[in-house]
Image (tube, rainbow, N blue to C red):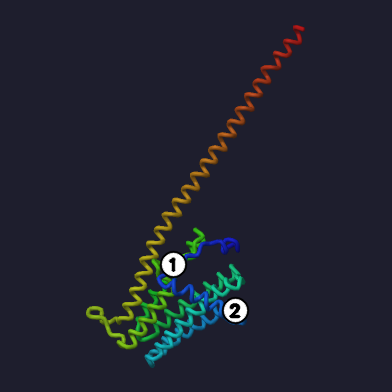
Amino acid sequence: MEEEKLRSHQRINDILLGPLERPALAWMARKMPAWVTPDILTGIGFFASILICVSFWLTTYDKNFLWLVSFGILLNWWGDSLDGSLARYRHIERPRYGFFIDHITDTLSEILVFVGLGLSPYVDFRIALIGLVCYLNISILVYLIMVTKGVFKISLWKIGPTEIRMIAILANIGIYFANNPKLPAPLNQYTYYDAVIAGVALLLLVFFFVEATRTGIELSAQDNYTRERREQRAVAKQDRRERKAADKQQRRARKQHRTPKKAADRLVN
């Protein structure tokens, strides 16, 4: 992808917590020490994902590790959200490298978080993997929309990664104090944390199909319009060629008509 396209794409992050998040990130970017670079923040965000994964697994032995999970979620938000803000504030953006590294680490982080969640005693591993698939589907959809429409849409119905992290922290707190009770019959083989992950996965899946359908219809209309315009230009070009050929033929006919007349005039004279 060309650098100019990466720079000129429209970035939409219309989230519920945006009025709080954007000023906070701008303030932290201004106060950040010079030795802290966007790459360091990206690395911190990725390290936080590893911390989340390991901490979820350790909750098998002690539920107090849920607090470390929540800390890792906050640390991941800090590193993952601030790296781009800091690069833009210092005017040191690297559009292609930044885009690639940011989304590679995001993908790996998503895998770590959901696998760690499935390794915990709170969420069925199958449900965790379903949540991971739905989240990755949304990531792919976001990237495809950016490539085809030039719009990088982070928020989904005013819900973005920040809101997902907040839901996860609140779920951790609730499960810690409620001890993750089972659902009522006939679903009592699953827990309330299972229900939270399944609900988020269902929300992501619904958005995926709605947004994919809407985008497909919009792109189809755009391509149909482009094809019609191309066909109209081709017809107009062919008409010009035919008119030009007809004019040329008429000039040739007039010239041939004038030549015998001039020869006759010379004979008379």
Q: Residues within 10 Å of mark 2 (few under 14, many from 20)?
A: some
Q: Quadrant of residue 207?
A: bottom left
How far across and down, in percent of the image, does residue 186 sit? 23, 78
Give the structural element (helix, strand or loop) at label 1.
loop
How far across and down, in percent of the image, does residue 177 sit? 32, 88
* Relative to 261, residue 245 above or below: below
Residue at horizontal 55%, vertical 37%?
Answer: 236
Residue type highlighted by circle 1: Asp
Residue type highlighted by circle 2: Thr
Q: Which mark is residue 94?
A: none
**78 on left or right of 176:** right
Q: Which residue is mark 2?
A: 37
Quadrant position of the C terminus in the picture: top right
* Alpha carbons under labels 1 and 2: distance apart: 26 Å
Give the structural element (helix, strand or loop) at label 2.
loop
Q: Which residue is mark 1?
A: 14
Residue at horizontal 56%, vertical 73%?
Answer: 101
Which residue is most to the top? Answer: 268
Residue 116 visible in rendering: yes
Residue at horizontal 56%, vertical 77%?
Answer: 30
In terms of depth relative to the viewer, which is nearer, 204 or 27?
Answer: 27
Q: Quadrant of residue 114?
A: bottom left
Q: Quadrant of residue 203?
A: bottom left
